[in-house]
Amino acid sequence: MAVLQDFRNNVKPNWCPGCGDYAVQAALQQAAVKLGLEPHQLAIVCGIGCSGRLSGYVYAYGMHTTHGRALPFAQGLKLANPELNVIACGGDGDGMAIGLGHTYHSIRRNVNITYVLMDNHVYGLTKGQTSPRSDLGFKTKTTPTGNIETPVATLEMALSAEASFVAQGFSTQLQELTDLIVAAVKHPGFSLVNVFSPCVTFNKVNTYDWFKERLVDISTFADYDRHDKGKVLQCILEHEGLLTGLLYEDKNKKSYEEVSGLASDNQMQAVRKFTTAEFNKLLEDFR
């Protein structure tokens, strides 16, 4: 059985010191161990942005795709090889701007993959511009007098797309985030895990302390029912989306694979696996 070290490689992350994405990477690796996966059973597909680097920092199959297009790649990968556990990763600029259409339709399509969205309310890789998730009044190089556009409501959008699994975590809460990713991967359908992952360099407003003062864990609500969409939405609206935990789950919605018949027609099972000798010979042919 794989251990944490098996999902580590020798590539040193070049995120800024204190970046929330370090914790997301750690949570992904710990989740893989908890799920009992081996590196060859996991594929991480990323878009463009600071978060897009994550696939290169984990020892598993990795794809660094084009801007906003991680989800189409991830869905194609899962449908082509259903035996893989596929996790797509991206930032709010990647998934809520150029990739928003793909995000919405991926949610409603309900292919059995997980999407970990790192939300820092700013464009980090391009050095600090307003993102679709930036708060009203947020000042950056592109909005020097303050953002005048209403931020995208990620959780409400996901529910409107008939999401079957919606969770939200925070980078400082590593254990909870790990457990949310484990639950997301186990969920038979598309699972969204939004993570507040502060940018310590270009967002001096939505800091770690800012989130700590405002976030509320749903475990503090005695009557919270994650299966009641109406009440979940009401709670999200009342707390302006600043909640953590497994917010919504619909166990009755069938995955794309089930509805399309692909679940019972796994072509990968008919593919003959290479022997070690055959694989080594193939490598020799390319040397």
Image: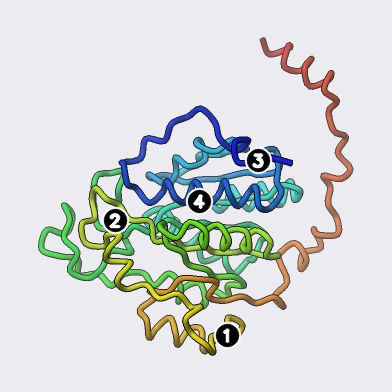
Three-letter residue code for mark 3: Val
Q: What element carries label 3?
A: loop
Q: Where residue 36 appears, x then y in whole percent?
A: 71, 49
Seen at 77% across and 17% down, the residue is 280
Q: In this view, does 183 lie above or below 11?
A: below
- The residue pinned by badge 4 equals 89
Seen at 68% across and 61% down, the residue is 186
Three-letter residue code for mark 2: Val
Quadrant position of the C terminus in the picture: top right
Instruction: Name the foreground residue: 233 vs 261.
Output: 233
**Of the two numbered discs 1 and 3 in the rendering, the one whose residue sits closer to the viewer:** 3
Q: Where residue 59 appears, x then y in whole percent?
A: 59, 35
- The residue pinned by badge 3 equals 3
- The residue pinned by badge 2 equals 122
Instruction: Name the foreground residue: 102 vs 217.
Output: 217
Seen at 41% across and 35% down, the residue is 13
Local crowd at mark 1 within 10 Å, few (<14), some, or many (≥20)? some
Q: What element carries label 4?
A: strand
Query: Which of pointers 1 and 3 lies earlier in the amino acid sequence?
Result: 3
Three-letter residue code for mark 4: Cys
Mark 3 and mark 2: span between their CA atoms?
34 Å
- The residue pinned by badge 1 equals 225
Mark 1 and mark 3: span between their CA atoms?
34 Å
Three-letter residue code for mark 1: Asp
Pointer 1 and pointer 4: residues touching (CB < 8 Å)?
A: no
**Of the two numbered discs 3 and 2 in the rendering, the one whose residue sits closer to the viewer:** 3
Q: What element carries label 2?
A: strand
Query: Which of pointers 1 and 2 lies earlier in the amino acid sequence?
Result: 2
